[in-house]
Image (tube, rainbow, N blue to C red):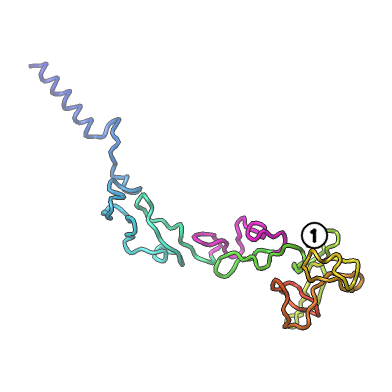
Amino acid sequence: MPRSVTLLQVVAVASLFACSGGSGDSSPRPQDAAVGGPNCNNGRIDPDEACEGFELRGKTCESEGFERGTLTCSTACTIDTTNCSTCGDRVISGLETCDTDDLGSRNCETEAGESFGELICGGDCIASSENCRSNVFGIRCQTHDDCSGDDDVCVNVGNDLNTNEPFQYCTRRCPAPGSPVGCETLFPSAICRQANPDSLCSLECESQDAFCPSGLLCLQGSCYGDPP
């Protein structure tokens, strides 16, 4: 009889150990519901899931505190806000390529393959390369150091009629006024124009409304980059 009792005790202890989830038990725990739960990806949303597939329980990027974007459900049946964003919060998120003055690691070289100019962040938080250039001509500058090369100079080409602020841009010294020599690598139609004290490369235009390539502005008979 004592031996029989001992065996029953062993069986009872073994059963208790198995029910308590001892070593070797890989079944889901209740807390696993936070990362999917035992029924995640079964084709229907269950009470312990935040979402399932395309079923989001009516939630959107807006309801999660964002301005726009597409809310999705992760493979762990949790809400995924990766594609949500709020333009203007200075955080690049969702489908944004920039936000306010934060361009991440983007520049004219990475976005447009151009060596000069300034990448800007648009009002839609998408980086714009409209001010990027393949050369220094028309690039806004403050000093000669902002331009590259020994023959590249920063020149004041006039003032804004509304603000009276100077328009200063990079261009290049050239040896032969009236000819394209030394300017042809800037733009195909650039010519050397007599200036004081140096002759400078320029793209000539007839009036303020005349068309200048690459979005340049016609100012005092020459094409230059967009105003500062």
User: Residue 212 in the image: x percent, y percent?
Assistant: 73, 76
The residue located at (27%, 31%) in the rendering is 22
Q: Quadrant of the C terminus?
A: bottom right
Considering only vertical position in the picture, is 30 above or below 26?
below
- Residue at image point 78% right, 62% down: 146
Task: Look at the magenta stretch and give its main secondary structure.
Answer: loop
Location of residue 77 in the rendering, given as x and y in whole percent from the top left corner? 34, 52
Q: Which residues are magenta?
A: 89-117
Callout 1 amino acid: Ser
In the picture, residue 218 is in which quadrant?
bottom right
Residue nearer the viewer, 106 or 15: 106
Where disc 1 sits, the SS reads loop
**Residue 52 at x, y = what percent?**
32, 55
| Above or below 83: residue 177 | below
The quadrant of the picture occupied by the N terminus is top left
The answer to whether any part of residue 50 appears in the image is no
- Tell me what residue is drawn at x 83 percent, y 71 percent: 191
Residue pushed farthest left?
Answer: 1
Q: Is residue 54 magenta?
A: no
Residue 112: x and y in percent read 65, 61
Q: Which residue is mark 1?
A: 148
Decide: few, some or many residues near mark 1? Use Cα within 10 Å; few <14, some 14-19, many ≥20: some
Q: Is residue 96 magenta?
A: yes
Q: Quadrant of residue 201?
A: bottom right
Judging depth in this view, the residue of 171 and 211 nearest the camera is 211
